[in-house]
Image (cartoon, rainbow, N blue to C red):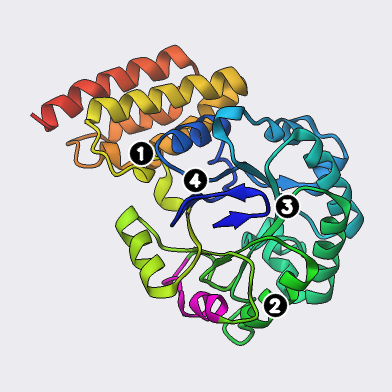
Amino acid sequence: MNIGPIQFGERPIFLAPMEDVTDIGFRRLCKRFGASMVYTEFVSAEALVRDVKTTVKKLSISDDERPVGIQIYGRDTDAMVEAARIVEQAGPDLIDLNFGCPVKKVAGKGAGAGMLQNIPKLLDITRQVVQAVSLPVTVKTRLGWNHDQLIITTLAEQLQDCGIKALTIHGRTRSQMYTGDADWTLIGEVKRNPRITIPIIGNGDIHSLDEADQAFDRYGVDAVMIGRATFGCPWLFSRQQLSTDEKLDLLLEQLHINVEMIDEPRGILHTRRHLAATPLFKGIPNFRPTRIAMLRATTVAELTDILEGTRSLLRQLNG
């Protein structure tokens, strides 16, 4: 499977772009363990055009995570075009347009999944961004705004006509947010459409490589993208079995990468998001006080001490 000049093997698995989750430390670990493609956190086009420092920092990528995409979102065509040009200078392998984020602060302002209520504008932005940059442009979106507006089969053809090189479809509507079950039937219908020639990437409710395999088999998608199941679990992309010690070492490594590449306060904040969600600590008796301390830690030394203490608990639990 190819996206423009980017070549992937068969059945590639992608890491979804997620705010406050897909920081550079996490992306590098996911890549190491088998993610075929990773994406940055999504980037506000308007903030990028205004040169907001925290937003610009999100464009930092490293060669050991390639191929890597940078995803942008916004509702203004000129800002999206200018942001795409700025992103191109950061040197990613592709630019992804976010027309799928359902959260109120994004979709409620007409960006992200909010664009599903203004298809002419969505298509105009896509067309103009494609024309403005030389990198492959891709799109990530949802089935529609709600179940009365399941427009993805038509929208997929329209987006392809705009010149995008791949389409990721999350199997929910905006109104569903992240509730209920993802519906892959329309994703499969888009893929089976003989007019569709670009790769179709399926996303939603994939929790393991076995479930990804089932999605490939049932729906014929070209790639599968995994999102929330990866929280605190960068080894999810690997079929090899890791010990609890090895997994804890990876979380510590992520902490140090983030602090080095971002800064100590925000590097810790980003890592704590994963520590709160990781399945590694499930089943440890009376773990709540340790979890609270972990999520309140403000220095690398403090958080490292807590995690090393957790190592002893894990060893006891696993014999």
Task: Give the camera-side residue of 221 and 18.
Answer: 221
> Looking at the image, which is closer to me, 247 or 95?
95
Q: Marks 3 and 1, how far apart in space?
A: 28 Å
Element class at badge 1: helix
Q: Residue sitting at 41 percent across and 15 percent down? A: 302
Q: Are marks 2 and 1 in contact (CB under 8 Å)?
A: no
- Residue found 72% across the figure and 64% down from its top: 108
Q: Name the residue under label 3.
A: 136
User: Residue 256, image x and y in percent?
Assistant: 48, 19
Tell me the distance, in whole angstroms, between the alpha carbons under discs 2 and 1: 35 Å
**Which of disc 2 and disc 4 is earlier in sequence?**
4
Q: Name the residue under label 1.
A: 235
The amino acid type, in three-letter code, at marker 1 is Trp
Residue type at mark 3 is Pro
Q: Would you say the residues marked 3 and 2 are in contact, meaning their CB atoms lie under 8 Å apart?
A: no
Q: Is residue 208 visible?
A: no
How many callouts does the rendering have?
Answer: 4
Q: Quadrant of residue 252?
A: top left
Q: How crowded is mark 3: few (under 14 residues within 10 Å), some or many (20 or more)?
A: many
For marks 3 and 2 on the same chain, the one whose residue lies earlier in the sequence: 3
What residue is shown with label 4? 36
Query: Is residue 306 in the magenta section?
Result: no
Compare marks 3 and 4 and give the one earlier in the sequence: 4
Judged from the image, the secondary structure of the residue bearing numbered disc 2 is helix
